[in-house]
Image (spheres, rainbow, N blue to C red):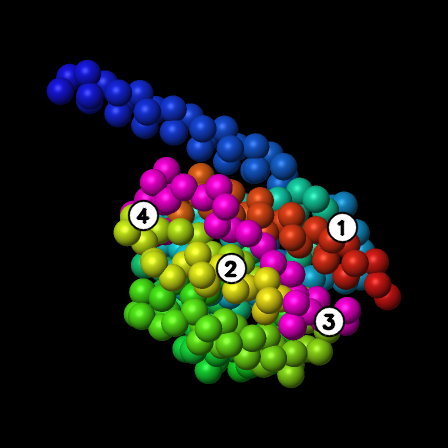
Amino acid sequence: MAEECGFYERRNMIHGVYVVVLVLGLILGGCGSDGTDGSVNQAGSPSSSKTAKIMPLGDSITASSAGQASYRYYLWQLAIGRGYKIDFVGSQHGVSGGAPKFNDFDMDHEGHGGWTTDQILAQVRSWAANTSPDFVLIHLGDNDMAAGQDSPGIVKELGQIIDQLRIINPRIAVVLAQIIPRVSPGLPQLSTFNAQLPALIAAKHLGSSPVVLVDQFTGFNPVTMTWDGIHPNAIGEAQMADRWISALDPLLDSFFASP
């Protein structure tokens, strides 16, 4: 028993050191942030006359929880570190249930804990009308599958969300995620659901309104990257942010390069 306890203590220490190093690197990379409200980045912006409005859209994985940073924090630091002038938008602020781990970023978002895709669909046009996003990051489907909805139904609703966003902004860019896994037994439909998303991307992508896929599933270990088997911890949030920025980079470059 003493040997087992020692093993877990060493493992937890290693994880702790890894998180500290990872977070520190992201923070140092984002030293251009302008303070606690985080609405713009003045230094190194690709275009001083434009700001990219980004709506993080989803459920509790987007919203995050008290004491957590949220993937949005790490994404903000990465984007600002690259010199992008951005503004996170949405009717929600901070994280659910209390204060976030950090507050030196733009905390606006459209993450709704426990919500299903059809619930988001019913409200998304109104949210977009109020905030006018240029980009929307979608991580949805987890709660639908947990409630027993079939994958084709969820995929159809995701397509309808894109349609509603385009009513408000015909040139909107959407980044749609193949969603992260849960700790076993997880969601039996998850692989099927994620496998159906490339066809949706192909059907919805337009040159004037791009829809791109981001793989948040591959390489995400819910045992080590979540704090409760479902919701990302600092390691998982940082990896999600890295995947988001990789998909966003060419879209943001194009946005700032256009008149």
Q: Secondary structure at mark 2?
A: helix
| Residues packed near mark 3 inside 10 Å, few (<14), some (14 to 19) or many (20 plus) | some
x, y percent for residue 89: 57, 66
x, y percent for residue 48: 79, 56
- Outermost residue to the top: 3
The answer, for residue 54, to whether it is visible in the render is no
Identify residue for label 3.
206
Magenta stretch in the rendered image: 202-231
- The residue sitting at 59% across, 62% down in the picture is 198
- The residue sitting at 50% across, 36% down in the picture is 23
Picture quadrant of residue 63:
bottom left
Q: Earlier in the sequence, mark 4 or mark 2?
A: 4
As shown in the figure, which amino acid type bears the numbered disc 3?
Leu
Q: Secondary structure at mark 3?
A: loop
| Residues packed near mark 1 inside 10 Å, few (<14), some (14 to 19) or many (20 plus) | many
In the rendered view, does 224 fall on the left or right side of 246?
left
**Mark pair 3, 1: CA separation:** 27 Å
Q: Earlier in the sequence, mark 2 or mark 1?
A: 1
Q: Are marks 3 and 4 in contact (CB under 8 Å)?
A: no
In this view, the residue in front, 162 or 42, is 162
82 in relation to 146, above or below: above
**Mark pair 2, 3: CA separation:** 21 Å
- Outermost residue to the left: 1
**Viewer-side label of 4, 2:** 2
- The residue sitting at 40% across, 51% down in the picture is 181
Identify residue for label 1.
45
In this view, the residue in front, 148 or 88, is 148
**Viewer-side label of 1, 4:** 4
Identify residue for label 4.
183
On whether residue 173 falls in the magenta region, the answer is no
